[in-house]
Image: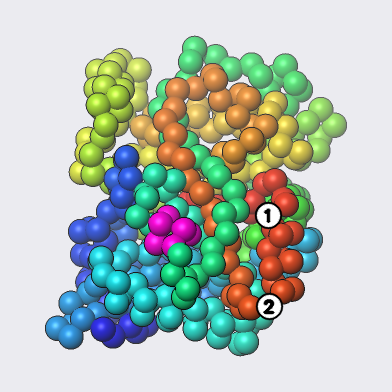
């Protein structure tokens, strides 16, 4: 078995491998990343790498990605790594060899770049992945620790025809203009600083996102302004369809019934239909969702404004809400489905006691700095 770093010439093979290997669970799904598998990684960070496993016939047997970026921990910026896209065919030998390569690469990142921690996410009911990565008793296992639970929330309808929560609380929603740019960047960075692994929104990073993300820019942002004129929340609905689409392989009967019912009335409501299994979803991500002090009233105004913007063009609106998140309080005004997920954290040098102490700092924080749309 050969494990090597991928290059752009491997793009077609990787896309084909992803198409054949969905993420398992009660709701099996895959990401269609055509035409350029590497494009999403470039959105995440300029520093990324992809690793492939090939057998003696050069057939692809596994894939994983690694992204390195600046993130906050204890209010200070440091280098962190995100592990993603793991797909391996079954086999103990491959699993052992892959574990060794990952451990060696993380140790190298610690030496070369000062990366102390890596993290990843898993579908909660993907029992095979969790058993292999988080609950394995093998002595050579990677020692992932559960960090935080969250739900990938897919909103497909709003209850009722009007929204007044933001108005009642004195919150005003405006579309971002050039004059808002500096205050918006500072707000994003201040909120991220309070979240472990939150993105460091330097001037360079914010400008890079606005410049390089497809179909994205300052005008994507909706801003929540309180009665004193202060910025208290923001969100940027983003259609990532140019580089990433979600494809559900099959639907349980309950979700299939919802799809049929919604599609029956969609034309009368001016709504797009919800895609069938095997088709890419017409969805939009609520990116850069930040709310000062996790205030449900601010969140309510933002999510209502986002829904009003996208309801005529997208069938689903995707966002991430964490276990115990105060923002759940306002979701009863929407109809949605939930996919339970979990975040795991891993020190890059497992033998160092100070890295484990830093891990405990991460676990103690309530709101992770995690962006589902970059997964």
Q: Say which element carries label 1.
A: helix
Q: Quadrant of the C terminus?
A: bottom left
Question: Nearer the N terminus, badge 1 or badge 2?
Answer: 2
Tell me where residue 87 appears, x and y as whole percent. 32, 64
Decide if residue 200 is on the left or right side of residue 345: right
Say which of 314 and 361 sits in front. 361
Task: Residue at 64% x, 35% y: name it.
Answer: 324
Tell me the magenta residue range.
130-136
Tell me where residue 177 appears, x and y as whole percent. 65, 45
Tell me where residue 371 appears, x and y as whole percent. 55, 52
- Quadrant assignment, res 232: top right
Say which of 372 and 222 sits in front. 372
How many residues crowd around disc 2 within 10 Å: few (fewer than 14), some, or many (20 or more)? Answer: few
Which residue lies under the disc numbered 1?
Answer: 363
Decide if residue 374 is on the left or right side of residue 329: left
Decide if residue 27 is on the left or right side of residue 293: left
Q: In the rendered image, is residue 32 in sight?
A: yes
Task: Residue at 74% x, 66% y: name it.
Answer: 357
Q: Quadrant of the N terminus?
A: bottom left
């Amino acid at each position: 078995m050969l494990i090597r770093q991928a290059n752009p010439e491997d793009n077609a093979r990787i896309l084909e491998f992803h198409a054949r290997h969905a993420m398992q669970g009660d709701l099996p799904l895959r990401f269609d990343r055509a035409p350029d598998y590497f494009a999403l990684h470039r959105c995440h960070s300029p520093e990324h790498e992809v690793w492939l496993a090939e057998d003696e016939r050069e057939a692809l047997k596994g894939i994983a990605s690694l992204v390195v970026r600046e993130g906050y921990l204890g209010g200070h910026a440091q280098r962190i790594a995100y592990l993603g896209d793991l797909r391996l065919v079954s086999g103990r030998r491959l699993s052992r060899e892959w574990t060794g390569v990952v451990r060696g690469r993380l140790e190298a990142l610690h030496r070369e770049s000062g990366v102390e921690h890596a993290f990843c996410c898993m579908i909660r009911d993907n029992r095979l992945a969790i058993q292999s990565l988080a609950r394995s008793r093998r002595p050579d296992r990677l020692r992932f620790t559960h960090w935080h639970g969250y739900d990938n929330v897919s909103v497909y309808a709003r209850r009722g025809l009007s929204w007044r929560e933001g108005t009642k609380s004195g919150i005003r929603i405006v579309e971002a203009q050039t004059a808002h740019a500096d205050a918006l960047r500072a707000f994003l960075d201040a909120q991220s600083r309070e979240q472990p692994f939150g993105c460091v929104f330097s001037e360079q990073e914010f400008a890079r996102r606005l410049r390089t993300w497809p179909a994205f820019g300052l005008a994507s942002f909706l801003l929540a302004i309180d009665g004193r004129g202060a910025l208290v929340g923001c969100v940027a609905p983003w259609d990532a369809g140019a580089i990433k689409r979600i494809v559900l392989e099959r639907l349980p009967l309950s979700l299939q019934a919802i799809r049929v019912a919604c599609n029956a009335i969609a034309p009368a409501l001016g709504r797009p239909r919800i895609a069938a299994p095997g088709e890419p979803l017409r969805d939009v991500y609520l990116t850069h969702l930040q709310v000062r002090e996790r205030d449900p009233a601010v969140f309510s105004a933002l999510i209502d404004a986002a829904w009003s913007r996208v309801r005529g063009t997208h069938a689903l609106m995707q966002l991430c809400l964490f276990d115990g998140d105060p923002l759940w309080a306002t979701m009863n005004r929407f109809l949605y489905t939930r996919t339970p997920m979990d975040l795991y954290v891993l020190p890059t040098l497992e033998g160092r006691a100070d890295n484990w102490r830093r891990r405990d700092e991460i676990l103690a924080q309530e709101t992770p700095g995690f962006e589902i749309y970059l997964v």
